[in-house]
Image (cartoon, rainbow, N blue to C red):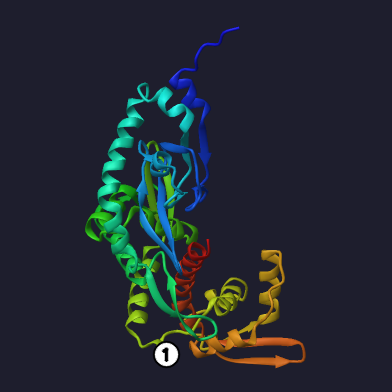
């Protein structure tokens, strides 16, 4: 019995891998006999370096990734993560020579990728080894060296880039909101502020989750619906002011302190307090019970974290009567600071996830 050899087209269709956003294609240190052709989507290349990692670049549709270990049988020199849903064609070593002449599109991409990366990667790694590392205090008050995917400087540049795109290139939607093509934001962020595409996309995702923008795909273009640029502009002023302060003068709010503010903001009614109200009493037991029910888990009340809230000037005092706990907040200051503090915490959480992941 004889079999017809599989065609190059059939081979490609049979070897497609579908990656979800955030899914890892390959990990640094692994060995593999495959390389990958990116049929659609974008991926980030990064390298581990304690206490974080180094961003090496972005791989786009039509390019090849994983070719170095494929060619020299060495362990993977970097990890690859999908920045968005991707279709990836896996090319095993055993099929490489069989289809080498039948696949000019990805073979050409392979050669171009090899030449570019061999010339630039070693210098790029040296430049980036310290650019994403900062010194910060942990929850025990100790100063530690840690990685930040998006530093304060990055956030200021990206936020400004989006404000520029919104003011110069936005169009008015039928519902009265403004929208701007994502390409304009990428232009200002990349060409004017020299930000990497991987950082632009992660920044955009955080703002989308925070409700500052809404990412929409219209035909073949991606547009950003601008829902709350006023909040982003206030965040710029806040981040710049905080960055200019001495460390002991900065608002001392950890994730635990923000958990208290989140519960109060969502369940106490303080965000609807009138401008003339000088103080606002929140039932902390009620706030935390509702927050726990929403999360589906028990959220313990942390007295130590409440001290952070008081030091930040957001609350006057905590009152405990028997098992009941109430707190007196300053509504005007709370309403002014909470939106930007919540946005800052989202970026902190993202950095922690990138650092630990």
What quarter of the picture does the N terminus occupy?
A: top right
**Residue nearer the viewer, 55 or 84:** 55
Left or right for 2, reference 295:
left
Residue 327 placement: quadrant: bottom right
Identify the residue shown where x is 57% and y is 89%.
307
Q: Secondary structure at mark 1?
A: helix
Residue 220: x and y in percent read: 37, 37
User: Looking at the image, is 166 positioned above or below residue 306?
Assistant: above
Residue 330: x and y in percent read: 51, 86
Q: Residues within 10 Å of mark 1 (few under 14, many from 20)?
A: few
Residue reaching furthest to the right: 322
Residue reaching furthest to the top: 1
Residue 266, can we see it? yes
Left or right for 347, reference 264:
left
User: Looking at the image, is 143 positioned above or below residue 87?
Assistant: below
Residue 277: x and y in percent read: 51, 85
Left or right for 190, reference 199:
left
Residue 173, can we see it? no
**On the image, numbered disc 1 is attached to which residue?**
248
Residue 287 placement: quadrant: bottom right
**Residue nearer the viewer, 104 or 327:** 104
């Amino acid at each position: 019995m004889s079999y017809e050899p599989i065609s190059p087209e059939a081979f490609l269709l049979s070897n497609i891998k579908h990656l979800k956003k955030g899914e890892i294609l390959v990990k640094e240190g692994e060995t593999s006999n495959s390389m990958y052709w990116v049929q659609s989507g974008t991926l980030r290349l990064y390298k581990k370096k304690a206490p974080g990692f180094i961003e090496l670049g972005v791989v786009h549709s039509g390019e090849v990734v994983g070719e170095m270990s494929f060619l020299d049988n060495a362990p993977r020199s970097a990890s690859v993560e999908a920045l968005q849903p991707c279709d990836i064609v896996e090319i095993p070593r055993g099929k490489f020579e069989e289809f080498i002449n039948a696949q000019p599109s990805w073979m050409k991409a392979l050669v171009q990728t090899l030449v570019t990366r061999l010339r630039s990667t070693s210098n790029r790694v040296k430049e980036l080894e310290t650019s994403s590392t900062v010194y910060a205090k942990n929850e025990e008050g100790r100063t530690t060296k840690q990685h930040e995917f998006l530093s304060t400087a990055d956030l200021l540049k990206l936020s400004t880039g989006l404000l520029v795109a919104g003011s110069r290139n936005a169009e008015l939607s039928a519902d009265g909101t403004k929208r701007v093509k994502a390409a304009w934001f990428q232009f200002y962020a990349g060409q004017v502020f020299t930000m990497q595409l991987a950082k632009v996309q992660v920044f955009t995702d955080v703002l989308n989750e925070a409700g500052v923008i809404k990412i929409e795909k219209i035909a073949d273009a991606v547009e950003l619906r601008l829902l709350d640029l006023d909040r982003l502009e206030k965040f710029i002023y806040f981040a710049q002011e905080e960055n200019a302060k001495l460390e002991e003068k900065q608002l001392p709010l950890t994730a635990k302190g923000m958990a208290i503010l989140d519960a109060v903001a969502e369940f106490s009614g303080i965000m609807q307090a009138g401008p003339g109200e000088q103080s606002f009493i929140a039932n902390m037991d009620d706030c935390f019970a509702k927050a726990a029910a929403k999360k589906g888990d028990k959220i313990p009340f942390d007295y130590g974290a409440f001290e952070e809230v008081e030091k930040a000037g957001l609350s006057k005092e905590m009152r405990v009567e028997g098992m009941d706990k109430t707190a007196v907040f300053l509504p005007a200051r709370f309403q002014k600071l909470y939106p930007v503090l919540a946005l800052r915490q989202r970026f902190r959480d993202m950095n922690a996830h990138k650092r630990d992941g």
